[in-house]
Image: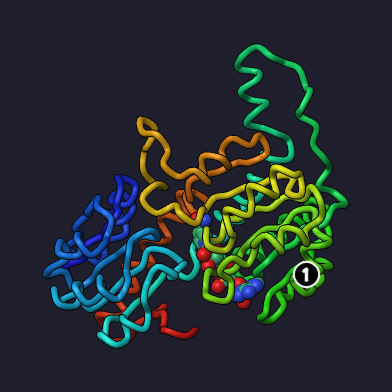
Amino acid sequence: MRMILFSSRQYDSDTFAEANGTHRYELHFQESHLDLETAVLARGYEVVCPFVNDNVDAAVLERLHAGGTRMIALRSAGFNHVDLAAAERLGVTVARVPAYSPHAVAEHAVGLILALNRRLPRAVARTREGDFSLHGLLGFDLHGKTVGVIGTGMIGRVFGRIMAGFGMQVLAHDPGTPADDLLALGARYVPLDILLAESDVVSLHCPLVPSTYHLIDGPALAKMKRGAMLINTGRGGLVESNALIGALKDGQLGHLGLDVYEEEGGLFFEDHSNLPLQDDVLARLLMFPNVIVTAHQAFFTREAMNEIAQTTLDNVAAWQAGAPHNVVRARI
Ligand code: NAD
């Protein structure tokens, strides 16, 4: 079985090479992003493994299919970058890695909260300069405050449990079944407007689908508690980036932690430090002292990487054996 991995880096080849020990597939690691132009590189590869910012739209899928590709083995949980209807029409199976250390993402969200609240980047920069003053570093106790968890699937649940451990009241919003473990910790499921109005910290853990696109827009930000904190480790498109700037400027939004960004494609996972940043919205966001941006690294722990590689290759094996596993269909 021949498989090509687009947007791959050294850490991908390391973890996939190890996980491939039992499968012994022929793996080709390709640094380029997958798009209409690079799809030709997959000619003759039955399995294509894209990453989160690769383009897997209908035109790309048609080109891949014409080159002999019959499976898209996503090495991610999110699948918003794939045209699932087109894949189904072409008979191309799409599988994903639904669960790989939810702890990695949840813990990163907590890291953003602590770093923002206690101004850790600023504090570290200051002590390195020999400045040991405290002005501007005043934080607040998380204990006794309210955290709003939007989406209580695997990651949101872990996140909610950690925050309950800090002594925070947990509010949750999810159209699905409430999570028993969160209910047992005293979490309350409430409509979105109530969660926004009552939370000191709001954290996004729902998927990006048409109904969640720009879930947090200008009106939603206006409904939040004044000075509250917003954390997005979900997907960039959940938040209307333009609306953030006004809310930060007038203090309605007190802190912002982003691990994902609407226009991150072509930017995140790359070193652009020698180039002028072309994205004016991101450039403006990076100027605020109460904003932290990380470049889609929440998943990036050793445990999660090993799990991703193993599950991706197991998905290929299951598909090859005629019993596809972790398949994503056009409507789930
Ligand atoms: P999951 O499928 O287990 O849970 C998602 C939950 O969101 C479900 O309970 C679902 O009912 C809920 N949901 C759907 N629509 C909603 C809405 N409108 N409002 C509130 N909740 C809604 O997924 P997961 O494993 O917990 O992952 C959540 C998301 O995190 C993924 O979709 C992915 O986009 C993102 N993610 C990011 C990273 C990263 O590195 N930053 C890594 C992995 C996953």
Q: Image point 25% across, 68% down: which residue?
A: 48
Q: Image point 29% across, 52% down: which residue?
A: 8
Q: Image point 41% across, 78% down: which residue?
A: 326
Residue at the far right: name it: 144
Which quadrant would the N terminus be assigned to in this image?
bottom left
Label 1 is placed on what type of residue?
Asp
The image quadrant that residue 86 belongs to is bottom left
Q: Position of residue 220 (x, y in %)?
A: 71, 63
Q: Is residue 139 in view?
A: yes
- Per the image, label 1 sits on a secondary structure element best described as helix
Q: Around disc 1, counting alpha carbons within 10 Å, would you say few (fewer than 14), some (14 to 19), or many (20 or more)?
A: few
Q: Which residue is mark 1?
A: 193
| Viewer-closest of 88 and 156 | 88
Q: Is residue 282 left or right of residue 17?
A: right
| Viewer-closest of 306 and 45 | 45
Q: Is residue 24 in view?
A: no
| Viewer-closest of 260 and 217 | 217
Q: Is residue 219 left or right of residue 90?
A: right
Residue at the far top: name it: 130
Q: Is residue 132 left or right of residue 83?
A: right
Q: Position of residue 271 (x, y in %)?
A: 36, 38
| Viewer-closest of 127 and 260 | 260
Q: Image point 58% across, 53% down: which residue?
A: 242
Colour scheme shown: rainbow
Residue 167 vs 313, above or below: the answer is above
* Ligand 1 positioned in quadrant: bottom right
Q: Position of residue 124 (x, y in %)?
A: 63, 25
Residue 216 vs 284, above or below: the answer is below
